[in-house]
Amino acid sequence: MSSPESKKLLGARVYSCSTCRTHAAYHDDIIAKEFRGRRGRAYLFADVSNVTLGIAEDRWLLTGLHSVRDAHCLSCNSLMGWKYERAYEPSQKYKEGKFVIEKAGVTHEGGW
């Protein structure tokens, strides 16, 4: 069940919040599938929808120090991952503005 403020994503290959099924991202927005989140495997997305972002904080991750904002489902407030605001290592700059969404936090819609 989606909140009135959430946006339904059109298309057959959509990821949704695993708790409430609010649409979150298009499969075609996946940049990489070999990321690690707090709870295991995660995807790097170019863009996601229907999330609220927490306050930016510096956090040490596997690839160094980053400024990140936690990303929560707009409808049920479940933690889905985070958004990279700033990468301090030059080799990690490509992550800025992108989202890591944990595989455990999303489900496929459309039976693909």
Image (tube, grey):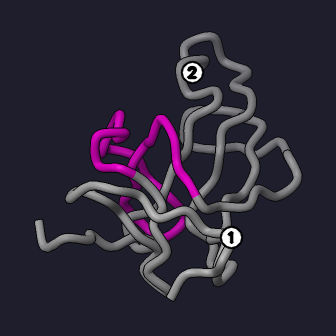
Which amino acid type is marked by label 2?
Answer: Gln
* Foreground disc of the pair 2, 1: 1
- Viewer-side residue, 61 vs 53: 53
User: Which residue is located at x 78 percent, y 37 percent?
Assistant: 67
Above or below, 47 against 105 in this view is above
Main SS, magenta region, reads strand
Figure quadrant of residue 61: top right
Badge 1 element: loop
Which amino acid type is marked by label 1?
Answer: Glu
Q: Position of residue 41 (x, y in %)?
A: 36, 60
Mark 1: few/some/many CA within 10 Å (<14, 14-19, 20+): few
Badge 2 element: helix
Q: Is 48 on the left or on the right of 71, as rendered?
A: left
Q: Position of residue 93 (x, y in %)?
A: 61, 17
Quarter of the C terminus within the rendering: bottom left
- Viewer-side residue, 39 vs 53: 53
Figure quadrant of residue 109: bottom left
Magenta run includes residue 63: no
Q: Position of residue 104 (x, y in %)?
A: 40, 73
Of the numbered discs 2 and 1, the one sitting upstream in the chain is 1
Q: Which residues are magenta?
A: 26-49
Residue 112 numbered mark, or none: none
The residue where tag 2 is placed is 92
User: Which residue is located at x 20 percent, y 59 percent?
Assistant: 12
Figure quadrant of residue 34: top left
The residue where tag 1 is placed is 5
Mark 2: few/some/many CA within 10 Å (<14, 14-19, 20+): some
Above or below, 19 against 31 in this view is below
Rounded to the nearest angstrom, the CA distance separating label 2 from label 1 is 33 Å
